[in-house]
Image: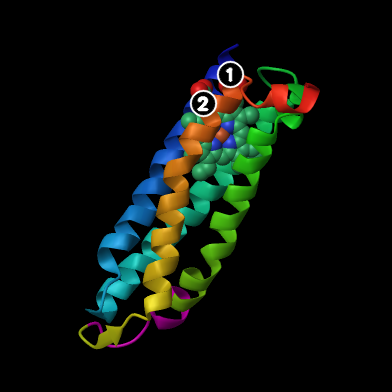
Amino acid sequence: MTDDLIIRYLHFVSIFILVAAVLGQHLILRGSITRALVGKAQKLDIAYAIAVVVVLATGLLQWFVVGKPADFYSSNPVFHTKLTLFLVIGLVSIYPSVYLGKNRKGAPDELVTIPKGIIWSVRVELFILFLMPLLATLMARGIGIAFVTE
Ligand code: HEM
């Protein structure tokens, strides 16, 4: 029971950090910015990566170890949609991660023009992130399972 609470708590806290990191990148990355700001966005990317690992680990623990039986989730297409979108966020984030890693070093005052694709990748991540809690609350209530058993 206590394990369950701690894992749920960590799932939420890591989601907050994930959203905060992506929102921070969204606010920083625009037009032409200094390399110092690129470095800041890259630091947020590290926080993002750590949060992704904790969200995934606590999600897997809730799926297979604590709480409801694994089948409750495995049999629900809403849950599979949530997993797929999580994967999509991960894939979309590769482009900004690689870009920020490559461009963080150099003179701090030098201006860097951020490619539109980077800005759009972060927007797409944010948009998908805001869909996830809806899917999560639906699947937690077993909504979606009926589509399979009918
Ligand atoms: C950004 C990604 C994610 C977000 C925003 C998110 C959001 C949430 C939220 C809001 C809940 C609570 C639902 C409720 O009690 O009403 C939840 C629970 C849960 N999440 Fe996630 N989640 C994410 C990723 C994942 C991943 C990757 C997995 C699986 C590997 C996962 C598995 C679960 C499970 C099994 C529960 C328990 C549902 C229940 O109480 O029955 N989540 N998630």
| In the displayed structure image, the side of residue 15 where residue 69 appears, left or right | right
The front one of 88 and 150 is 150
- Is disc 1 placed on a helix, strand or loop? loop
In percent of the image, x 37 and y 53: which residue is there?
21
Mark 2 close to ligand 1, CB under 8 Å: yes
Relative vertical location of residue 127 with respect to residue 29 in this rendering, above or below: above
The front one of 116 and 104 is 116
Q: Is residue 104 magenta?
A: yes
- Is disc 2 placed on a helix, strand or loop? helix
Q: What is the quadrant of residue 100 in the picture? A: bottom left
Looking at the rendering, the quadrant in which ligand 1 lies is top right
The magenta stretch is 100-108
**Residue of label 2:** 137
Residue 51: percent from left, percent from top: 49, 47
Q: Mark 1: which amino acid?
A: Arg
Label ID, residue 80: none
Residue 144: percent from left, percent from top: 65, 27
**Residue of label 1:** 141
The front one of 131 and 44 is 131
